[in-house]
Amino acid sequence: MDDRKVNRKLAAIFSADVKDYSRLMAENEVDTVTSIKACRELLFQKISTHDGRVVDSPGDNILSEFSSVTNAVACAVEIQKVLMERNKDLTDDRKMEFRIGINLGDIIEDDERIYGDGINIAARLEGIAQGGGICISGSAWDQVKNRLPLGYEFLGNKELKNISGPVPVYRVLSDPLSAGSLKYRHKKDDPAYKRRKHRIVGVILILLLVGGGILFKKNTLFTPAEHRKMIRQKLMDLRIPDKPSIAVLPFVNMSKDKEQEYFSDGLTEDLITDLSRISGLFVIARNSVFFYKNKKVTIDKIGRDLGVKYVLEGSVRKVGDRVRITAQLIDSKTEGHVWAERYDRDLKDIFSLQDEVREKIITALAVRMTSDDKKRIMMKGTRNLEAYDYYLKANGLCSSTDLGKLAEGRELLQNAIRLDPKFAKAYAAMGKTFFTQWIFGPDKDPAILNKVFEWGQKAIEINPDEPAGYSQLAHYYLWTKQHDLGIDEIKKALALDPNNPDWLASYGELLTHSNQPGPGIDLFIKAIRLDPKYPVWYMFGLGHAYFLTRDYDQAIFSLEKAAVQDPGFWPSYLMLAAAYDAKGMKEDSQKAVKRALEENKNLASEKWEQLVPYKDPAAGKQMMDVLKKIQIYP
């Protein structure tokens, strides 16, 4: 061949052969030849269907090339699926199982033949694969990882015969439950494990350098040892979930009018809500992603802080009756773009545009949706643009604990309901304002709590598939001590929105007050993982649950974290005082009592017997005895 006329190209090389072919021939040549001919015809047909070309097929081996790695892997998966069905009725000793190796590499083409290391690597990968299995190289995986509804297991960097340098090897996982996952056969290969190991070493070095005592402030409630635990907890990386994980950052308001901020925030929240209803996704909560609003933080750091593989960022420009939305999905590790798009639409098309963006994300992440997932995401709040606008304006106000802002939010929600009486989310949001008023306001009038029930019930009557209505009923039933009814309602909410951390934490709260603090702990921990910048009541609830299990060390650790996060949240000090007392730490207990009284002047006069919602009267009495012992209640 004339070197000056060498034709090189990049191609996906597909190499397949039969496991135990020599044994099969030795045992029954006629049956094996008949079977291999039938299998070869099947493979040829599938390769052609997926735009591949069979280059050579000596004996039991088939060598093919594809211009697309995606087509090559999709073809391999389909072949193995059909062969598995064909082998189903055969005895184990007569099954014809193919092993397939796929590599993306540079090859030399000469007439109909191909040459090069790219082919040799594919052949070596085929040798690593199990019968009925598929192994691909790192170069192939880089191209296909987000494009098919498959999972992968990293087998490590393998030394292959006659190949210079190690080759990253991945096993293809085709079962639906593995879709979107990346597993590691060896723990040492997992980047998250390596980061955790490095962090732990760093923490140890820090603790050694500071001598353990310098890190904690003067006049703090916490001991040096407990501060060390807090630092270690903070620096540990969050493990990336097995299923596709995503954080949707607040869309940037690009409009000249800063008053339009509510609109971009609302679109972000709606997208988070839609995605969180998909069981095959792990979606970080609104509370945590809005922590990064208007902050200059790298995508890599956000991915590590929140423990997610992907980050979505975008912007919104609303001018008159037109809206422009840009969105880009980014791999948090490489900071490479997985998908990006810009949309210019009429404002009236905003709802269909939201659907389109959501579908693009689902496709890019190769998420396989169940029928229940599809039903949940198709549920719409309203198609009335003006009602939707009022609802978005009310959102920020209704998230406040300020009674004046809550009243303003209710007026806006009333306008939304007037324009669309079937807007169930607006009814549920109205119920939430009354619950916030009852919890944080000075008036514990049962009539306020009754409004939580009324508005939640209306939301469910209008739309039984709106989960927020069930959550309002769950709150009402907890504080009226109808625990079993509350548990039923919060389960309904979670069935419709499985990624919602507030409802997981509410479920944990209901179980904790129902003499089931153990399962409650698990739910609080799940909620904290979904919302790493969690509201203080998650950590308080976790500490409370640990206290009831008599794990006072964990209770103190959790409650101290809550006190650091929000020094004005007086229940943390109250429960801390009880936990310190149980550990015999009398001085610390009295300091905590003092802080609780400083934050709530009316603490000692509250009617605790009526307010504390324990299901078991004995548990309520036990808590009253604790409060009396620490001198918080006469």
Image: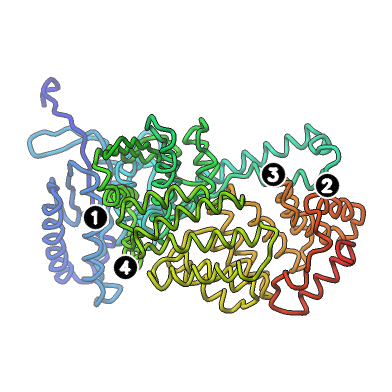
x and y, in percent, of residue 408 in the image:
52, 50
Q: Is residue 557 above or below residue 25?
A: above
Q: Secondary structure at mark 3?
A: helix
Distance from disc 2 to disc 4, alpha carbons, whole Å, reads 51 Å
Of callouts 1 and 3, which one flags the residue occurring earlier in the amino acid sequence?
A: 1
* Residue to which mark 2 is pinned: 221
**Colour approach in the figure:** rainbow
Using residue 548 as the reference point, say whether residue 131 is left or right of it: left
Distance from disc 1 to disc 3, alpha carbons, whole Å, reads 45 Å
Amino acid identity at mark 2: Leu
Q: Secondary structure at mark 1?
A: helix
* Residue to which mark 3 is pinned: 232
Residues marked 4 and 1 touching at CB (< 8 Å): no
Instruction: Please tell me the numbered disc located at residue 95.
Output: none
* Residue to which mark 1 is pinned: 76
x and y, in percent, of residue 351 in the image:
29, 51
**Residue 407: quarter of image:** bottom right
Of callouts 1 and 2, which one flags the residue occurring earlier in the amino acid sequence?
A: 1
Using residue 554 as the reference point, say whether residue 64 is left or right of it: left
